[in-house]
Image: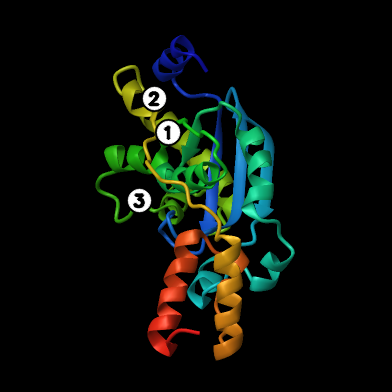
Amino acid sequence: MDESELMESRLEMVESFVCIDLETTGLNPKKDKIIEIGAVKVVKGEVVDTFETFVNPHRPLEERIQQLTGIDPKDLEGAKDITEILPSVLEFVGEDVLLGHSILFDYSFLKKAAVDQKLKFERLGVDTLKIARKFLPNLESRSLDFLCKHYEIPHKAHRALEDAKATVALYHKLKENFATEETKKDFLAGNLLFQVKRDTPATKAQVERLYKLIAQHKLNPEIAPEQMTRSEASRYTDQVLAKYGRL
């Protein structure tokens, strides 16, 4: 998208976009992992395609996340790694504007995954949470689940594709109720800003050393050494050495 197209897209009320929603192992994109991706492609106000997949985080799924999402660890065992899935996600998204409820959260996880694969991922976005906070200040909550109940939108909470579908419906409701020529600016796409550094995989030497430590001390790490980043491997090695001493 060149500069003129970028400026034009900012000035138009967003009718075409990809609504994206993620389920993750936690809230920090710099250390937590994606476990499910759901997306809905909308062209001129109409849903034309959907995307849904589990993602293997290569680490245990905490009980609280299982209860929140209804995702079972067995659902993730046969899932592909984010490195295999991300190209399909980026192809589905294309150059479209991103829509989401607290869109920066989902964008930050996708950008972290892209940066780790040496890929650029810069997009414009529209946030239904920001819109709801502006025009519905007196509601008890502006969570997606609460807003869906408020507008009687069918919603199965905390599953990626269902959340994405509900967010599309919510966006249309918010536009219908509050979008005018005077409030147009509140519905325009803006830059999504998130800075993150690339994590590199653990080196062969780090992995070999960790397996020696694991065997010697009969350890059971939550993350397999070959799935660790260089910093994770270094941190885990230091923890083991601090507790048990050197080989």
153 with respect to 39 (left or right):
left
Q: CA distance from mark 3 to mark 2?
A: 20 Å
Where residue 91 appears, as percent x and y from the top left, is 66, 33
Q: Which mark is residue 2?
A: none
Residue ID for mark 2: 188
Q: Which mark is residue 142?
A: 3
Q: Residue furthest top?
A: 4
At 37% from the left and 44% from the top, the residue drawn is 129
Q: Are marks 3 and 2 in contact (CB under 8 Å)?
A: no
Q: Amino acid at mark 1?
A: Val
Q: Residue furthest right?
A: 78
133 with respect to 53 (left or right):
left
Nearer the observer: mark 3 or 2; the answer is 2
Q: CA distance from mark 1 to mark 3?
A: 16 Å
Q: Which mark is residue 126?
A: 1
Which element is circle 3 on? loop
Nearer the observer: mark 1 or 3; the answer is 1
Tag 3 or tag 1, which sits nearer the N-term?
A: 1
Is residue 157 at all visible to an observer of this figure?
no
Tell me, what colour scheme is on the image? Answer: rainbow
Q: Are marks 1 and 2 in contact (CB under 8 Å)?
A: yes
Which element is circle 2 on? loop
Q: Amino acid at mark 3?
A: Arg
Does residue 124 sit above or below 20 in this rendering? above
- Front residue of this view, candidates 198 and 29: 198
